[in-house]
Image: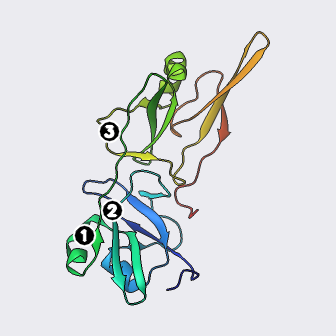
């Protein structure tokens, strides 16, 4: 397939022990996809498949063909055989949680996936009780199964507007869709339906 051909939505298991599939679009041909363990997705995206995540990233494999070099993500189970077929394979990348003096990593659980992002540490300290009620949890360096920046599934957002004298501040956060909003919070968005292909 050429670079201008239509791209197909496929998925791979990104690393050993992963509890989700990593979904992405590719335009490599179906024979090459098969060598890399790609599972083609047609119709609705299956539950347990994460689309467009910034992290973690599966290992990337590349191989030179007569028509040029082909590179794509590879399923962890396909790596041994792909190497014998001439593919060069890199390493999967995982981003863990943690905190600094200015921010803290947090997550909500959505369909078994830990959707993670960073918030200002002062917000966590000031609104921890509300955030905890809405399913937000602090992430640590022990969390190796965090999903960062996925377009699907994406949890809903909630916000609260606070008036202090002449100042009005709005604070927003992702929330667990199965939790109850804390007092004073309202929904800002519904999130991304995980079964709809973005």
The answer to whether the residue labelled 3 contacts the one labelled 1, judged by CB atoms less than 8 Å apart, is: no
| Callout 3 crowding tier (Cα within 10 Å): few <14, some 14–19, many ≥20 | some
Q: Nearer the viewer, residue 188 or 100?
A: 100
Disc 3/disc 2 C-alpha distance (Å)? 19 Å
Q: Nearer the viewer, residue 34 or 45?
A: 34
Give the number of the mark in front: 3 or 1: 1
Disc 3/disc 1 C-alpha distance (Å)? 25 Å
Marking on residue 59: 2
List the residue tagged with mark 3. 143
In the image: residue 119, left or right of residue 68: right
The answer to whether the residue labelled 2 contacts the one labelled 1, judged by CB atoms less than 8 Å apart, is: yes
Residue shown at 31% from the left, 43% from the top: 144
Res. 80 image quadrant: bottom left
The answer to whether the residue labelled 3 contacts the one labelled 2, judged by CB atoms less than 8 Å apart, is: no
Residue 120 sits above or below residue 157 on the image: above
Residue shown at 70% from the left, 22% from the top: 169
Q: Position of residue 31 (x, y in %)?
A: 37, 85
Q: Which of marks 1 and 2 precedes in the sequence?
A: 2
Residue shown at 47% from the left, 52% from the top: 54
Res. 33 image quadrant: bottom left
Q: Position of residue 65 (x, y in %)?
A: 36, 86
Q: Secondary structure at mark 2?
A: loop
Q: Which of marks 1 and 3 precedes in the sequence?
A: 1
Disc 2/disc 1 C-alpha distance (Å)? 9 Å
Residue shown at 25% from the left, 53% from the top: 17
Q: Position of residue 5 (x, y in %)?
A: 56, 83
List the residue tagged with mark 1. 79
């Amino acid at each position: 397939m050429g670079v201008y051909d239509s791209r197909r939505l496929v998925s791979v298991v990104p690393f050993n022990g992963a509890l989700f599939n990593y979904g992405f679009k590719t335009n490599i041909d179906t024979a090459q996809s098969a060598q890399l363990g790609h599972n083609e997705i047609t119709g609705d995206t299956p539950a347990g498949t994460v689309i467009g995540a910034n992290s973690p990233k599966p290992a990337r494999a590349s191989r030179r063909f007569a028509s040029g070099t082909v590179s794509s993500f590879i399923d962890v189970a396909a790596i041994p055989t792909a190497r014998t077929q001439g593919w060069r394979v890199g390493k999967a990348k995982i981003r863990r949680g943690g905190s600094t003096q200015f921010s803290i990593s947090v997550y909500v659980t959505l369909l078994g996936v830990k959707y993670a992002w960073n918030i200002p540490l002062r917000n966590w300290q000031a609104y921890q009780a509300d955030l905890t009620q809405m399913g937000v949890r602090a992430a640590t360096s022990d969390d190796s199964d965090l999903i960062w920046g996925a377009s699907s599934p994406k949890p809903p957002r909630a916000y609260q507007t606070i008036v202090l004298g002449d100042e009005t501040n709005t604070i927003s956060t992702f929330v667990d869709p199965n939790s109850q909003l804390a007092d004073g919070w309202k929904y800002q968005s519904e999130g991304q339906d995980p079964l709809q292909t973005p």
